[in-house]
Amino acid sequence: MRLLIDMDGVCCHTYQAVADWYNKEYGGGCILAEQKHFLISELCVKAPDGAVKAYFDSPGFFRNLPVRKGCPEVLYRLHKRGHDIVFVTHVPKQSVTGLYEKREWLQEHLPFISPRNIIAAQRKELVSGDLLLDDGPENIISFPGITCVFDAPYNREVAGTHRIYTWFEFENIVKRIGVRI
């Protein structure tokens, strides 16, 4: 199968990095368990307008994100089983280094994946694949194929999808779905 995989919030702890920066910079208040909106800036109320966007755009931000537990091992096994793993990720328009840094991140944490297998897209439903793993509600809702949503407080209203909490659950779903396709 061709597995379309989001990066931010799925492969890496993007929102945790923002929350850590914000809480250090502005003295706390960014509690991810309270994040009810996909845009984390809605939770970062003490920051001046544009500060969160600027942090996303700072050199090194995407390159240094912590990897989510289980991601490398599970994707390695799925790759070895012959699945075509393609990363479909959003890169902020104003980010000069975002796509380059995401490629570097992939080469460090998932060196078995070709750098050609990363697509920057704002409309993921336009990318052809058998299954999309994402955390963004809009991406999950608009994708025409099979979807898995990586659980987060801001996507709990999304129905009609496979909800996962760990990478190991994703691996099991891919095994089950692969048998049916």
Image (cartoon, rainbow, N blue to C red):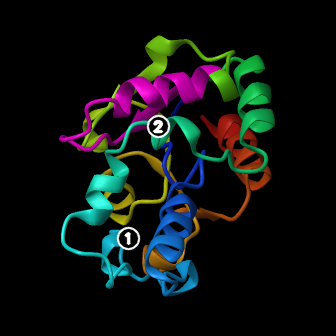
> Left or right: where does residue 173 sit relative to residue 54?
right
Q: Give me the disc on residue 128.
A: none
Residue 9 locus on image (x, y percent): 53, 55
Q: Secondary structure at mark 1?
A: helix
Residue drawn at (52%, 35%) of the image: 63
Observer-nearest of 165 and 57 = 57
Taking the spot 27% from the left edge, 64% from the top edge, the residue there is 51
Q: Is residue 117 above or below residue 33?
A: above
Give percent across and percent down for residue 14.
Answer: 51, 55
Mark 1, other Cα within 10 Å: few <14 / some 14–19 / many ≥20? many
Q: Which is nearer the eye, 79 or 34?
A: 34
Q: Which mark is residue 40?
A: 1
Quick check: 30 left or right of 174?
Answer: left
Work out which quarter of the rendered image holds the C terminus and state it. top right
**What amino acid is at disc 1?**
Ile
Q: Residue at x 36, y 77 (%)?
A: 37
Q: Which residues are magenta?
A: 84-107
As for residue 97 lying within the magenta part, the answer is yes
Quarter of the picture holding the N terminus: top right
Q: Name the residue rendered at 80%, 28% in the picture.
A: 77
Rendered location of residue 97, percent (x, y): 33, 29
Depth check, mark 2 against mark 1: the one in front is 2
For the residue carrying disc 2, how many other residues have a C-alpha within 10 Å: few (<14), some (14-19), or many (20+)? Answer: some
124 vs 153, nearest the viewer: 153
Residue for badge 2? 60
Residue 58's place in the image compared with 81, above or below, is below
Distance from disc 2 to disc 1, alpha carbons, whole Å, reads 19 Å
Percent across and percent down for residue 157 are 43, 81
Q: Secondary structure at mark 2?
A: loop
Which label's residue is closer to the chain start, 2 or 1? 1
Q: Residue type at mark 2?
A: Gly
Q: How many marks?
A: 2
